[in-house]
Amino acid sequence: MDFLGFLTRPPEKTSGLHPNQKGMINAVKKMTKFVKSLAMLACLAVCLWCAGESLQNWARERGGEALLWAAGMEYAGTPAPLESPDTQSAPVWTQEGLRDQRLAQEDSGNLPDDGVVPFHSDLLPGLNATPDPSRSTGPVEEIQIEGGAQVGNFFVKDSTESGTDLEAELAEPTDLHIKADGSVEVLIYHTHTSEAYSVSAPGFYYTDMETRTQNRDMSVTAAGEALAKALEARGIGVVHDTTVNDTAFNGSYARSWEVLQKNLAEHPGIQVTIDVHRDSMTTEEGLKYKPTVEVGGRKAAQAMLLAGCDADGSWGDFPDWRQNLRLILKVQQKAQELYGGLMRPLNFSNSKYNMNATTGSMLIEVGTEVNTVAEARYTGQLLGEVIAETLKDCA
């Protein structure tokens, strides 16, 4: 007998059938209704189980928030999701949210001194403060570098023997005319692009530490990027050229000269060029100095401005060095006004270092290899504020 066909075929008249046949048909109909009801109950049970599992997972994740929600109350303890350029809504407990949160902390000046906030990739881990016994270490000493002859409210180390009256040069105007309308007027570049900083500040260094890197989050370009952002935030258009010019140390200035000329040709409005470097100071005994200053309750790497000189005209291609000197003196003065101690004494020397490219050229050394990259970035941010204020005064 075709049982399924029998169950699904249209109802037939039962008159004329044997009583036993009628009974069988009625029994089958009852069984069909029972099976259908049982199936519906099973489906409902599965749905309820799935919903309960989801609710339980949500409650586990939200904890007390779930109880407050069940009671009809709003929970205000979880931070609102942060907007990320890569995701529509990245909650703070995701990696994307954490990165955005750290970037927001940096912008607000709350970045921990031992942190690393990259400008183009994920967070980098810190180092353990306990030395690895299998590696040789040396001591690090935090210092604040002072000295030199006083000029106005700051100090200068003058090794030129040129007899330049620095007070008089400081009083002279520059020939810069900064519009600060967003158009490109500043170039930031790096002759020694791969100069590296430390991840953390444990009070020692490994003698086999890498002092050069192609990781832009750990190199001097990170300080340059912070400087660029601070200038841009104040309406000054910037090109930050991160071309690596020190694949071989010799010839770095010749290669960065080409970078300079390329950018000056592409952006004829550039009036100021800033070559951002990182210094290094190690004694014969192996002690490394970490020039550091506290600004706003947070550590920053001390920076040094270098001004070149061609007093006797022997180079023949650096006739406007006084214009550069006047700008650099004014930047040093402004830095002392805004963030006293941020700058080391200004270095005035018989040097050129591509500062003959424009009449607004300067070279800045930010910290040493044992300063943390966070300290260097903070200094870049502060320098951006200082230079922006100086340039606006020159407008």
Image (tube, grey):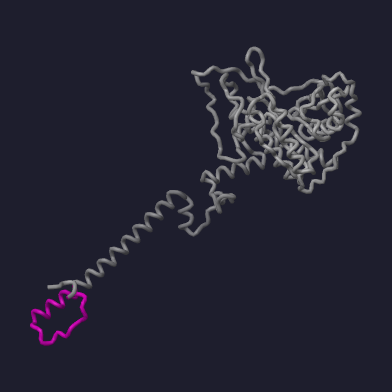
Q: Is residue 57 above or below residue 115?
A: below
Q: Is residue 371 visible?
A: yes
**Count of numbered labels shown in the rendering:** 0
How would you classify the magenta stretch by its main secondary structure? helix
State the residue at coordinates (42%, 49%). 60
Which residue is located at x 37 percent, y 56 percent?
52
Q: Is residue 56 left or right of residue 111?
A: left
Determine the residue located farthest toward the bottom in the rendered image: 15
Image spot of residue 370 (x, y percent): 63, 25
Of residues 59 and 248, the one drawn nearer to the viewer in this rendering: 248
| Picture coordinates of residue 252, whole percent (x, y) | 69, 27
Residue 151 percent coordinates (x, y): 86, 26
Quadrant location of the N terminus in the rendered image: bottom left
Q: Position of residue 26 (x, y in %)?
A: 16, 78
Q: Is residue 34 magenta?
A: no
Picture layout, residue 328 above or below residue 106:
above
- Up/down of 233 relative to 131, above or below: below
Q: Is residue 137 left or right of residue 315?
A: left
What's drawn in magenta, residue-wise? Answer: 6-30
Q: Residue 375: in sight, yes or no?
A: no
Q: Quadrant of the C terminus?
A: top right
